[in-house]
Image: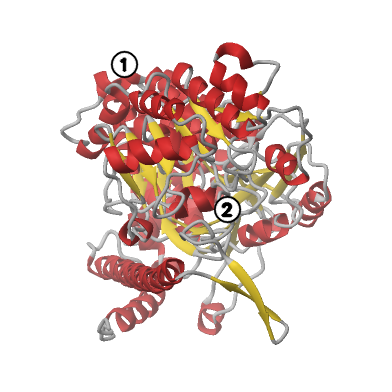
Amino acid sequence: MTSILHLLHLDDRFLQNDQEMPAVTEIDYDDVYKHLQAEREKSAKFLTDAFAKKFRGMRSNLTVITRGEVKMKPNISIIIPVYNVEAYLADCLDSILAQTFESFEVILVDDGSTDGSPAIAQKYADAHSEQIRYYRKENGGPGLARNFGISKAKGDYLMFVDSDDIVDPEMLTDLYESAFVLESDIIFCPYFRHGLYQEVTIEGTYDFDMDKVYTGTDFLKQSDYTVTTCSKLYRTAFVKQFAFPAHWFEDVAWLPVVMSYAKKISYVSTPYYHYLRHDTSIVSSTSNKQILGSLDAIRFIVQNANPEAASEVAPFTASLTLYMCTRRPAFADRYVDLLMENKDFILSNTNFEEHPRLKVRLDYYYNAFQAIPKHIYYDHFGKTTLTEQEQNNLDTLVGTLVEFDAKITCLNEENCDIDEHPAIRKAYDEGRYHVVGQYFKCKKLMEEGGIALSKQVRGIKYITPLLLRTQALFGFQNDTSITERIYAAVAGHPVMQEIFDVFMAHIDQDDAMTIAMREILMQKNQLTYSYDLECNFKQKYLTAYNETVRVYATCVLAHDYGIGSAYSDCHTKPLSKEIKNGTEYTLVDSFYFDTLLRITKDYTVYQMNRERQNKANETFFLHRKIGNLRNRMHRQAMRITVLKDRSENIKMHYDAVTRMKIIWYPYQFLRKLFPAKDVKAWMTQREADKKLAYFRQIIEQPEEEDE
């Protein structure tokens, strides 16, 4: 929508009836300027020299068009990359068109959509041709789409909006006001994060004063790992020197680099942007191959950030890498490798006195860290056919237990020498193939490290994070034994050698591995199963061997990795079933029943406490939002009060404008063209009185006491 400047001739009739004269059909700027100069000389109360000069200079930005309207370059360009978002695009555009700020343009860049998005974009572009420009390009990713949008931007400021998000109506108004007053390069605000299950949180809050200017490094100091290009306003001339990379997670790569060079940024504390997560988005995924683009994003930051800001960029990239390691568990090992890759940069540029928590986390990885290889070994001896359940378990390991970058090896007669030990040949000839399999899996873990897995294990949750937290891991089968269905270790760990020695001593028994694990872990190291272990919602494991070995509770390995379908392995006696009145009941022993009841009770209490904390957080954010609104109204009221008390050469009087009046749409239009104090001076005394009365009525209302 084009900003319109109407020059209206006023007389007493129109002033009294609050009516507007029709717009003139032609404007002679020299006559207008001469008239304003004459008015200034006639009454210094009406116009300052700065006002007159700036009005004269604005002629280059205005074009006379038909019907007496004047077209102006937009203040803000909103860039929206579009790709297969037909379900969300209309809501996004509707929220933008509802802005109270009017001087903006929308640049839609379709990145080769294959759904109905192009039709929706074209429909809006046709209906709002003065404000929306629509472009199509071949698919190249969101980074190249953003670069294309920047090249087409005409506004002094620009903003990025994701095509599946929405914004509140006041967003542009408030961010532009901060930009105009503080002359900032970047202006940002918090945002609402809408989760996959309708939960809403406020993120991106900072301990910044809204009336002050900060640097981009101040932003990085408080950011930890919060990175989003949206909910921000950028000075176009400043950001045009920074191109987005072509890989995925281009926003994660771009923003820290831009911030490292930014000298003037400002903050608006009210959240206006609504970030909506969807099941199909890359950000929501924890395993999609494209999320590996975040590795390239972090490398981009290290390579392109301002060298003078390295003391802030280094701890930021370290925190971001550790966050990604937790957020993307399927590829946690990749992020640890990247942490090692950037070790010199991080350690040489980080002041750990300012980042003590980061130091503790990095010490774990930088001091003798050793991860368990993401290599699964399962056995299949005897040349028998896999059962349907076993085949299904193996087929679904990728995408449940590990991702595509893991190695999976089947140990069988083709790659294992059955004759390398007489006891193994004997067990094989006797048909005790599971004993043979345990032998070769244990040897592989001792020699190369990895994960020993049974074909009966059904993956439910990624195991990669567990591989990074210890050098060997096991799990309780029940209160008397350790499971042999899944365990893992780094190469050469002493616990595997000790277990192997005991295993060989009992190799004639079918449960040789169970005996070996019980003897080494439960008896020698005195690791005892307990209810407290099972129901500890923060630490569900016991440690041994100087905390390099973890033995997890049954609810971790029995549940997450399919060893038990429920708590069926948390008992000492076999389950039995009986039918009463046509209903099948499962009989359980007292240990299993008591544990289940206690877990249910304690977990309920745990969840209730979490809900109380969440409600307390919501109340806190609500009161803060109310306080911000009240402070904002108070500041505006104070500005109007200052207007009334300003010196005589600034005040606005009716007598000085009986022959001419300028109506502006929107108010921010004049604030862009003229100094703020002169725009305030242009307000009529009657308008000032009305606004002053309104704001005083608001701020003088008694505050409601917090409950």
Q: Residues within 10 Å of mark 2 (few under 14, many from 20)?
A: many
Residue 535 x, y percent position in the rendering: 36, 61
Describe the element under mark 2 as helix, strand or loop: loop
Any mark on residue 486, and which?
Answer: none
- Of residues 149 and 113, the one drawn nearer to the viewer in this rendering: 113
Describe the element under mark 1 as helix, strand or loop: helix
Asked whether residue 263 is in view, the answer is: no
Against 165, residue 328 (above or below) is above
Q: Report the residue marked by disc 1.
A: 344
Residue 157 x, y percent position in the rendering: 51, 42
State the residue at coordinates (76%, 53%): 86
The disc, 2 or 1, on the residue closer to the chain's N-terminal end is 2
Q: Report the residue marked by disc 2.
A: 103
Q: Is residue 436 left or right of residue 115?
A: left
Against 555, residue 136 (above or below) is above
Q: Quadrant of the N terminus?
A: bottom right
Q: Residues within 10 Å of mark 1 (few under 14, many from 20)?
A: few
Please name the amino acid that badge 2 sits on: Ser
Please name the amino acid that badge 1 sits on: Asp
Residue 186 x, y percent position in the rendering: 41, 41
Image quadrant assignment for residue 286: top right
Residue 35 x, y percent position in the rendering: 48, 54
- Of residues 259 and 687, the one drawn nearer to the viewer in this rendering: 259
Q: Quadrant of the C terminus?
A: bottom left
Which residue is situated farthest in the left direction here? 353
Separation of disc 2 and disc 1 at Cα?
48 Å
Q: Nearer the viewer, mark 2 or mark 1?
A: 1
Q: Are marks 2 and 1 in contact (CB under 8 Å)?
A: no
State the residue at coordinates (25%, 63%): 648
